[in-house]
Amino acid sequence: MKNFVWKSIYFGKKSFLWIVYLLFAIYIFYLVTSAQELGAKLIFGGLGGIVLSVVILFEYLKTIYEKMIYALTVDCDLKKAIALKETLQKKDLFNGFKQSIIIFDSLLLLDEGNYHVCLDHLHKNQHFFHSTLDYLFIYYHTQMYCFSFLNDEENLNSCLESLFKLKNVKKKQMRGLFSWNEIAGMRYFHQNRNKKCLSELDLIDKNRLNNRELTYLLYLKGQCLLKLNELSEGHRSLKEAKALGNTLAVAQMI
């Protein structure tokens, strides 16, 4: 149902944009055909053609980018996501999606299980990630999972402290990219306060999560249940995570 709604909204917006572009093209055609002088025809035609070419190229690249994000976050298909990323980079002549690729690579490296490489990538691009609060949120959230999977408790605790400092920032300054209940759950899990972890995870609205996010949540919940010796529920949660996660490294660990 979520996929149907997402696709309906997506195609609705796309259809509206292409109608606007078509009307613009018709208007340019009208200017060219109605102009009396050759110079005016060339100017209108040339400028209109350039604008339409740039717009169409951008929309084409944006479509590839959206498919790339969908492949990672909904299909959880790493090979497909990587192939689309390579296509985007080859055809992005003006590097308009360079910053988006930096963010995407941080998620991709985490999902591939390349935790040390992911941390190196975040460090290499830390100036970029510190440029906005949203990017900084992604920076620490990705670090959180890397340190968790690496069992690096010291750096994980430091990362969690940095994350909770962001919680005090005014909501208007930062979008709700991730759930604070998830982050609190991670902290309780590593403190071995498993019942508190579960209570935090149960507060998360799962309808707002994509398959990728839900995979990590179910994995954490499953591990927590196993620690509480609730084996049946724990394995059920992990089995669901494996099915949703498809090719993600976290799903392969189950």
Image (cartoon, rainbow, N blue to C red):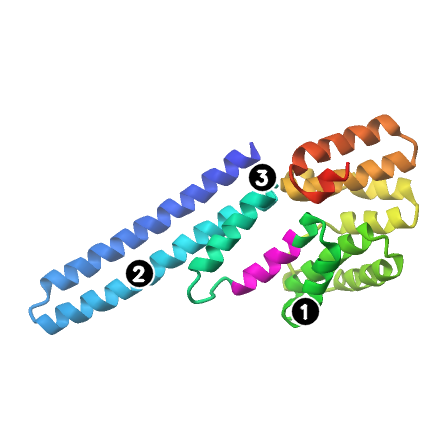
Measured in 3D between alpha carbons, the distance from the residue under mark 1 to the one under mark 3, in whole angstroms, is 28 Å
Mark 1 or 3: the one toward you:
1
SS for dot 3: loop
What residue span does the magenta drawing correspond to?
A: 98-108
Task: Compute the Cα span from label 2 to label 1.
Answer: 35 Å
For label 3, the crowd category at 10 Å Cα-Cα, with few meaning under 14, some 14 to 19 and many 20 or more, is many
- Please report contact status of discs 1 and 3: CB closer than 8 Å, yes or no: no
Q: Name the residue under label 2.
A: 53
Q: Residue 253 lies in what quarter of the image?
A: top right
The quadrant in which residue 155 appears is bottom right
Taking the image as shown, residue 58 lies to the left or right of residue 19, namely right
Q: Examine the structure image and report whether residue 103 is included in the region drawn in magenta.
A: yes
Q: Is residue 149 above or below residue 98?
A: above
Nearer mark to the viewer, of 2 and 1? 1
Q: Give the quarter of the figure containing the N terminus.
A: top right
The location of residue 91, given as percent across then percent down, is 42, 58
Locate residue 109 relative to residue 53 in the image: left or right.
right
* Residue at (73% x, 61% y) in the render: 119
Q: Looking at the picture, tell me which residue is in the foreground, 228 or 172.
A: 228
Tell me the kind of residue under disc 2: Ser
- Amino acid beneath label 1: Lys
Residue, x 51% and y 40% (percent of image)?
A: 6
Label 2 SS: helix
Residue matched to label 3:
75
Give me the residue at 41% from left, 42% from top. 12
Residue 1 against residue 120 in the figure, above or below:
above
Gap between marks 3 and 2 measured at Cα = 31 Å
Q: Percent from the top left, x then y, of residue 122?
A: 69, 64
Q: Name the residue under label 1.
A: 124
Check disc 3 and give the amino acid type: Asp
Residue 219 percent coordinates (x, y): 77, 39
Query: Can you see residue 45?
Result: yes
